[in-house]
Image (cartoon, rainbow, N blue to C red):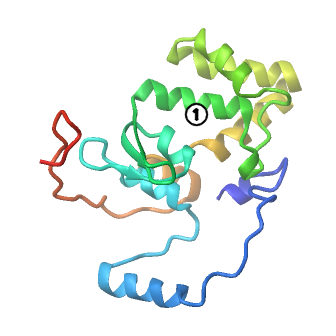
Amino acid sequence: FRYAAATTKPYKGNRKYGDKPIIFPAIKEYLRQMWGFTSVTELEADDLVSVYHDPLKTVICSPDKDVLYQNKGIHYNYGKAESIVVDENEALRFLWKQMLMGDSTDGIIGLPKVGEKTADTWLNSLLPNEMHEFVLNKYIEKFGISEGIHKFAETFKLVYMLKSKEDVLRETGIILGDLITYDVKPLNNNNEWL
């Protein structure tokens, strides 16, 4: 759905994708038969991870900053071999930081000439419930009211990780079935499985 939402610049347009490994179709078929794997072409894996994530029962394992920092909970970045704990306010702050900066990896522009330092400076002075209005106003200041609102809405669709079945339905029209639940024991105070 993000490819259709990106009207300013193609979503992930600067990435070079090669052919998938020759074994890829066989792996997909094995996962389908053995694990009930389902392919959802309208969504990214990051969104599905976010939708099915239960901060009290699961640990997100990913090297992707978007899925790690926009979801509250305990996560593991296997690319850096580090654990990350994100609370609700930090997840919200990361979203608005991306709105300001954009994401060059995915071809998302954000506000011109706003980098990490400027975004951090602006957001550090705000309460979580003030960030939405502040960022919208920055877009309007830069682009004018009509174009600013349009670019704000487009950027939001591109950076926001879908986190619920309602988010998925709103953005794609897809009705997801019941959420998967796992019988996972929680972590103790030392972050060890019980």
Which is more toward the observer, 128 or 66?
66
Location of residue 121 with respect to 87 vertically, above or below: above
Is 57 left, or right, of 97 in this rendering?
A: left
Is 176 left, or right, of 109 in this rendering?
A: left
Does residue 165 show up?
A: no
Which is more toward the observer, 24 or 176?
24
Name which residue lies at 51% across and 17% down.
Answer: 129
Name which residue lies at 60% across and 19% down.
Answer: 131
Residue receiving disc 1: 95
Work out which residue is located at the far front of the displayed protein and give it.
81
**Residue 5 on image: x %, y %:** 72, 52
**Residue 34 on image: x %, y %:** 30, 84
- Mark 1 secondary-structure assignment: helix
Which is more toward the observer, 120 or 36?
120
Work out which residue is located at the far top of the displayed protein and give it.
125
Is 35 left, or right, of 16 in this rendering?
A: left
Tag 1: amino acid: Leu
Name which residue lies at 78% across and 36% down.
Answer: 150
Name which residue lies at 77% across and 30% down.
Answer: 149
Location of residue 29 with respect to 36 vertically, above or below: below
Number of labels in the image equals 1
